[in-house]
């Protein structure tokens, strides 16, 4: 039940909106490679193969502090808000959360960008207090919607919604394709449904993604390390949030993207993309 601001783009398999959206930046800005070929093997339209992907295993802590304020901590991602139905900033002044407790076992959060609702998440705490199940209705920039679901189990001490939680199941109705275009020493990555695009050099120079829902100060960088692999990282205002790498398959028909939150390398997730 990590509430969060706006999407960096489509990937939604981690607990709560913020962490899922921030980590998605690294994956939407996925693979690229330097090449002397006229047509790069990375060029084309790609789609996530959920059956071959491993989307769970990330953890976070939810704790209640003074003045009814709650803090979510997932390593490099940490933010505080209240379940009072009022807007609280997330990431920057343009992104807010309005959260309430429906009852002792149900929480609901509405996420907005500049007053526009981008997602509504409902979290259910099991009767024994050891499982949180969430369902999120997400709004894309093109007006379409999709639903994500996630299950988290208690892996540390706590009571009620408070405690340490680790994701064990995740699903999404989204099957939005994305395009990659490599030209010389630059890559362009785009998701039309999210109205998202980024063009960057492949030498590690930070680039700024463009999207109506982008968090201020977000950047992504790519570093070519071999003919089939590129390392990448995402940052917000210079603070590294996530890192990982993309590896192209020998036949060029798929690539694997491995991602982790900065400082939490033991909690890797793996996405497999296939070329359409």
Image: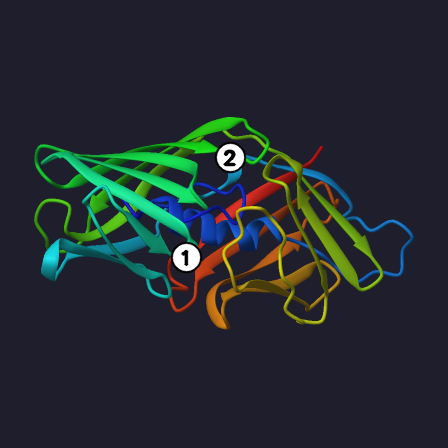
Picture residue at 41% right of the left edge, 64% below the top = 265
Which of disc 1 and disc 2 is earlier in sequence? 2
- Picture layout, residue 127 above or below residue 53: above
Which residue corresponds to the image point at 89% horizontal and 61% vertical from the top-left? 36
Number of the label disc, if any, that sits on residue 170:
none
State if disc 1 and disc 2 touch (CB < 8 Å). Answer: no
Quadrant location of the N terminus in the rendered image? top left
x, y (%) of residue 247? 64, 55
Residue 173 appears in the rendering: no
Q: Nearer the viewer, residue 132 or 267?
A: 132
* Image side of residue 151 versus residue 188, left or right: left
Crowd band around label 2 with a 10 angstrom C-alpha radius: few (<14), some (14–19), many (20+): some
- Seen as rendered, the residue at the extreme right is 38
Q: Secondary structure at mark 2?
A: helix
Q: Which mark is residue 93?
A: 1
Q: CA distance from mark 2 to mark 1?
A: 34 Å
């Amino acid at each position: 039940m990590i509430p969060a601001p706006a999407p960096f783009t489509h990937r939604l398999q981690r607990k709560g909106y913020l962490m899922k959206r921030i980590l998605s930046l690294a994956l939407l800005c996925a693979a690229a490679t330097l090449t002397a070929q006229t047509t790069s093997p990375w060029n084309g339209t790609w789609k996530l193969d959920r059956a071959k992907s491993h989307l769970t295993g990330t953890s976070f802590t939810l704790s209640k502090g003074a003045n009814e304020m709650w803090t979510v901590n997932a390593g490099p991602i940490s933010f505080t808000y209240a379940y009072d139905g009022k807007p609280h900033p997330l990431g920057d002044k343009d992104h807010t959360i309005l959260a309430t407790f429906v009852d002792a076992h149900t929480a609901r959060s509405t996420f907005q960008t500049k007053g526009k609702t981008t997602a509504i998440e409902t979290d259910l705490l099991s009767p024994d207090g050891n499982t949180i199940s969430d369902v999120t209705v997400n709004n894309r920039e093109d007006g379409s919607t999709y639903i994500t679901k996630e299950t988290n189990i208690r892996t540390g001490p706590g009571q009620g919604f408070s405690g340490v939680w680790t994701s064990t199941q995740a699903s999404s109705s989204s099957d939005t394709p994305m395009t990659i275009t490599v030209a010389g020493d630059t890559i362009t990555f785009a998701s039309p449904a999210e109205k998202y695009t980024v063009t960057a050099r492949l030498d590690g120079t930070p680039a700024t993604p463009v999207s109506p829902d982008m968090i201020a100060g977000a950047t992504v960088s790519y570093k070519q390390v071999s003919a089939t692999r590129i390392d990448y990282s995402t940052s917000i205002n210079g603070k590294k949030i996530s890192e990982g790498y993309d590896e192209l398959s020998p036949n060029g028909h798929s690539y694997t993207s491995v991602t982790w939150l900065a400082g939490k390398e033991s909690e890797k997730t793996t996405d497999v993309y296939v070329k359409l």
